[in-house]
Image (cartoon, rainbow, N blue to C red):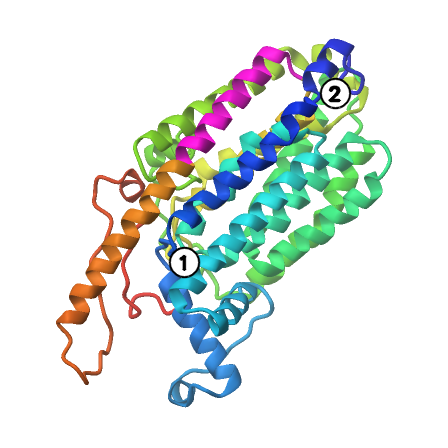
Amino acid sequence: MTLAEPPARLRAQAAPRSGFAWAVPAFALAVVLLPFLASGSFPSQDGPAHLHTAGLLAGLRDGTAPVAAVFLEEVSPGPTNLAAYWLLSRLMEALAPARAEWAMALLLSLLLLASLAGAVRLAGGGAASLLPALPLAAPIMLHMGSFALVLAMAPAFLALGCAARWLRGGGGGGAALAGFGALGLLACALQIQVAVPLLAAVGGGALAGWGWRGLAGAGWWPPGRLVGLCLAALPVAAAALAYGLLMPPGHAGQSPRWEPLRQAALLGLRGEVAWFSLADPAVLALAGLVLALAALAWAWRGPRAAGGAAGDLAPPVLLGGAAAIAAAALVLPLETAAVPQVPQRLLPFAQLLLALWFAATPLPAGWRRAVLACAAAAALVTTLSRAAAHVAVADRLGAALAAAEARIAPGSVVAYLRLPSVLDEKYPAQRFGGLMLRFDPTTHLG
């Protein structure tokens, strides 16, 4: 038996059922839309500060902010990190600021959903294979207000899907490899931080694929598809190097802080997804555990039993890339002075690679049913808790703003308005360094 030509029984189990195929996209769309339909505002930590920055940027560009222009000047280091501000400023031209933030988050969620569906399809999965990746349409960095990073995740996810397509072999592989390089470079232009997980995925995956083939008896000479993938990643490496050379020395790595237990908890409890109830980390951890056990059971059989010599490099490379990113989330600091929440920025890519491995690998029906059932339950529970939390935060924020406005005398000029946190300590997201919803333009001007 080989991965390139699985037996008819496994092919039948891996193929999506036509009667179920339409339900998964509908379920996925409902999971993404429900929290936004439940409330007309979006809770994020840095979103209000980014709204302020986007408004200032638009005003400086069109000359409608003469006072700010006296002491502020637009400095453009290139396209990276600016596209999100431009899009947000365009939305603010048509919508009120809070509604523009809501629309921005909705657009990003739909973009992530489309990129996840495309990546899974490129990896060879059917409609149902989207379920393990579905929580990544609402990463915690979206609720942190890191709009530029989330915007860059969409082409980066598609780039990894193109890599999986290239590794599968067959027709269209060359176009997939070109797509990986182009989309990876686009993602770096939108937010350079995605270069780290992309390069870790390629490096760790290439080592895993090389070792897998060697143990399978196919020889230790690196196969052309691994070499091609590494070469296609060179522009991403060059972009990261160029950006690093332009940064002040030591800027990104200043004041590193490690918390091994907390970083391990973020890995095990799926900290890359926002938690709004105690049920969220529980169901996410269960879904992640079942998927990880399925991967370990497949790898335990060994490369010869799994058909590693047949030329289908996608499963071992995807699994090795996921392991490399997970290791990076544990080894790199939890945060630095310039980059907070490092694991939460990396782990979405590890989970995506696991989902792509699931899409690309023929598995026994029992494993597939268990993974899909747990993934669907996790998606349902987390979207319901998100919807409830969106409503609760909107109500509390409205009450806090009304109380603050009542204390401001008519005709007053408010230098800045600071509100306390509107989420209680009982929320697990706050305890694990997640949402700290404060509104103070003096602490984060973008």
* Residue 421 percent across, percent down from the top left: 23, 54
Q: Residue at x 22, y 64 (%)?
A: 401
Q: Is residue 218 found inside the magenta-colored segment of the image?
A: no
Q: Nearer the viewer, residue 72 or 44?
A: 44
Q: Residue at x 53, y 63 (%)?
A: 84
Please give left or right for residue 181 compared with residue 69 in the image: right
Count of numbered badges drawn on the protein: 2
* Residue 293 percent across, percent down from the top left: 52, 17
Q: Say which amino acid is labelled 2.
A: Gly
Residue 85 seen by the camera: yes
From the image, which quarter does the N terminus lie in?
A: top right
Residue 441 image-quadrant placement: bottom left
Residue 300 seen by the camera: no
Q: Nearer the viewer, residue 49 or 185?
A: 49
* Residue 24 percent across, percent down from the top left: 59, 31
Please give left or right for residue 345 compared with residue 214 in the image: left
Question: In the rendered structure, which segment of residues is drawn in magenta?
Answer: 363-382
Q: Nearer the viewer, residue 65 or 191?
A: 65
Q: Which mark is residue 338?
A: 1
Q: How busy is the neighbourhood of tag 1: few (under 14 within 10 Å), some, or many (20 plus)?
A: few
Residue underneath mark 2: 214
Q: Is residue 370 found inside the magenta-colored segment of the image?
A: yes
From the image, which quarter does the C terminus lie in?
A: bottom left
Residue 175 image-quadrant placement: top right
* Residue 184 percent across, percent down from the top left: 67, 51
Give SS at disc 2. helix
Depth-wise, is mark 1 or mark 2 nearer the camera? Answer: 1
Q: Is residue 407 above or below residue 389?
A: below
For marks 1 and 2, the one nearer the N-term is: 2
Q: Residue at x 48, y 22 (%)?
A: 374
Q: Say which amino acid is labelled 1.
A: Ala
